[in-house]
Image (cartoon, rainbow, N blue to C red):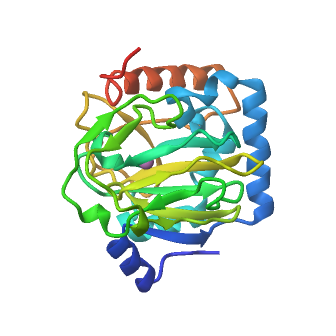
Amino acid sequence: MSIHLSPEQIDSYRRDGFLCPIPVMSPVDANHHRTSLENVQASHPELMEGVAAQKLHLVTSWMADIIRTPTILDAVESLIGPNLLCWSSTLFVKPPDGKAFVSWHQDGNYWGLDNPEVATAWLALTPATSKNGCMRMIPGSHEWEASAHIETFANDNLLSRGQVMAREIDDAAAVDLILAPGEISLHHVNVAHASEPNRSTESRIGIAIRYISPRVRQNRGNTDSATLVRGTDSIGNFQHEERPSRDFAPDAMAQLARVVECRVSSVYQDMPK
Ligand code: NI
């Protein structure tokens, strides 16, 4: 199955800054991924937070496979071209506590990536609904002028800095990105998005996979790394990461430690310890 986007879908993405839902795997496969995630949660809880939780594809074959899912790459290729690096694979597990939320923000504001050839594929491993706190987006906001963000470091905010856009957001204009397990949404690096607390009785689980073109450069700090998942990289703006030979292999864990250290000293250099 190939799922390159249709011209209509590409137009819709360019107009709104997001597109959904796009089926990329069966609900059964999505559920297998959920089980694998829960296994990591049980065996290596320390990898489920901070920068490590953005890079599990370096230490588990499970996530190494997810970021190379051909149907996901087909869709992303339709937006940012045939050469693709995976910059991160961030877990978003939102417990049914009615508290954890994500404030209105634009990813491009703080990632340090110097051009918008960046697309996020958000893969649902459970349903993502209005009730359990799916992502919400403002159509067309990727075209807004860059907005200042205020860093709140609020406890229940799932964002690393608790950042919130300084400009007023018209909540009534927001669209809920409702997904079934095995579906993705795609969003532009500058689209304004947020999500409400999970008011259901089950966790809402998704993985935000960030893809970039090799033409993108990192402006925060000197070095950054990414995994080449399709095509070629003749530019070399990012150090290339290796796929793990097996789950939690010592050399893979050592690579993860180096990559985490590198990102902490670049993208997250001004974070409080
Ligand atoms: Ni975001």
Q: In front here: 216 or 94?
A: 94
Q: Position of residue 196 (x, y in %)?
A: 55, 50
Judge by depth and name the residue closer to the eye, 197 or 248.
197
Disc tally is 0
Residue 131 placement, left or right of 177: right
> Looking at this view, is 223 or 191 the one in front?
191
Task: Say which quadrant the N terminus sits in.
Answer: bottom right
The residue positioned 37% from the left and 31% from the top of the image is: 152
Residue 86 in view here: no
Residue 61, placed above or below residue 14: above
Q: Is residue 15 above or below residue 110?
A: below
For the C terminus, which image quadrant? top left
- Can residue 114 be seen here? yes
x, y percent for residue 264: 39, 23
Q: In the current view of this chain or complex, which residue is farthest to the left?
A: 145
In the current view of this chain or complex, which residue is farthest to the top? 273
- Where is residue 81, by image quadrant? bottom left
Give left or right: position of 267 versus 67: left
Q: Position of residue 260 (x, y in %)?
A: 46, 24
Going 80% across and 44% down the picture, which residue do you hit?
35
Q: Position of residue 45 (x, y in %)?
A: 69, 24
Foreground pick, 34 / 174: 174
Eyeballing the image, is 206 above or below 55? below
Q: Is residue 7 above or below residue 37?
A: below
Q: To which quarter of the image does residue 120 belong?
A: bottom left
